[in-house]
Every structure is written in C-alpha cells, then in structure tokens.
Amino acid sequence: MAPPGETERRREQQAFADRVAGLQDFDGAFELVKSAVFKKFKMHRAGLSLILQVMPSNLGAYHILGSNVIVMNSYVLAAIKRISGSDSEYNAYLFMVLAHEYLHSLGIVDENTVRQMTYDLCKALLGEGHSSTLMTKEDPSSLFPQLRYMAQNQFSSDFHVVKNFDKAGQSYIQ
C-alpha cells in the first residue's frame, strides 16, 4: 500500500506528464515551463524571445546573459524530432531544455546549480522515470544515443526567431 499522499502525488505527476506530452508549440511549452518553475521555485519573469540556430551538436541551447533571448539548437531539435519514438519524447526534450534555459534567464548563472534545479523540477513534477527527468539526470544522449554520433561542429550564421513565443509576457499589440 502506498504511503499517505503518494497516490495523489503520482496522479499529479501523471497529469503534468500528460500536459508535457500534449504540447503543440514552443509557446505552449514555455508557458508550461514558466508555471512549473513558479510552482516549484516561486520564480518568474516574462518577455523572453526564442531563436532557433544550428549550433555544435554538443550544445542544446543557451541563454545570452543579461538578455531576453534563449537560443536553441535547431540541428539537435530536428534530430530528436526525427529519432524520438514519439511526440511525447520530443516534447520531454523541449520542456527540459526550455526549463534549463529559463532558470538561467532568472539570473542563475552557475551551470551545476541550474542542472540540479532542472532535475529537481522534473523529478518533482514528472517523476523519476519521465524522459525529461532522465535526460536532466544525465544528458539527452542517455535517451537518444544516436546523438553521440552526430558531428555538427559549427555555428550557422542563419537563425530563425520564433513568432508568438512568450505571448503571455507581451503587453503590447503585435
């Protein structure tokens, strides 16, 4: 028999995992990230932009310190879309990376601190066995070993600004 509260915690984790699995776009993923970070750490900021750019394959994304920009590796994102077994695995990656970079955007610069916070967030809200948690505990190649053999080593000068990202943080009419 489960300890008191354990059944309810698992039910909440499953409901949150269903929300991650059902993500439809970058903005929906980011809104879920912001609500998760606020729920777990009581931290929030708005007004971020997302840029997609081909980068070396060992880099998933980065936040430009002091800016309102998250840059995500479109090469790795496309590879995970192609090799993942389902939309839910792709969404798990998207959620995990956006959560990690969102924490950086909140002023937390230490990489180890952000990694631990991202792991704590995923474990608490999604459970130990969820794909986001597993990727955060180790790295995305633990779930997608094919990533280890991808040899992209350069930054592209081309980039794409994602439209309608962080819409809730925009207080003006576009």
Image (cartoon, rainbow, N blue to C red):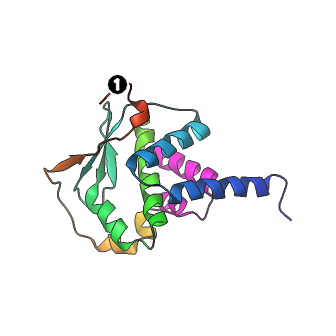
Does the magenta-highlighted stretch encompass residue 128?
yes
- The residue under the point 41% across, 39% down is 104
Q: From the image, which quarter does the N terminus lie in? A: bottom right
Q: Position of residue 170 (x, y in %)?
A: 38, 29
Q: Judge from the rendering whether residue 4 lies leftward or rightward of residue 102; answer left or right.
A: right
Q: From the image, which quarter does the C terminus lie in? A: top left
Disc 1 secondary structure class: loop
Does the magenta-highlighted stretch encompass residue 20?
no
Residue 150 vs 165, above or below: the answer is: below
Q: Position of residue 17 (x, y in %)?
A: 58, 57
Q: Amino acid at mark 1?
A: Tyr
Q: Position of residue 5 (x, y in %)?
A: 80, 52
- The residue under the point 14% across, 51% down is 158
Outermost residue, left direction? 157
Q: Judge from the rendering whether residue 149 lies leftward or rightward of residue 44; answer left or right.
A: left
Give the quarter of the image for residue 129. bottom right
- The residue under the point 44% across, 44% down is 30
Label 1 packing within 10 angstroms: few (<14), some (14-19), many (20+): few
Magenta stretch in the rendered image = 112-138
Outermost residue, front direction? 173
Q: Of helix, strand and loop, which mostly describes the magenta segment?
A: helix
Outermost residue, top direction? 172
Nearer the observer, 108 or 126? 126
Number of marks in the rendered image: 1
- From the image, tell me which residue sits under label 1: 172
Task: Tell me if residue 58 can be seen.
Answer: yes
Task: Tell me if residue 100 can be seen.
Answer: no
- The residue under the point 63% across, 51% down is 124
Residue 94 vs 31, above or below: the answer is: below
Residue 55 vs 62, above or below: the answer is: below
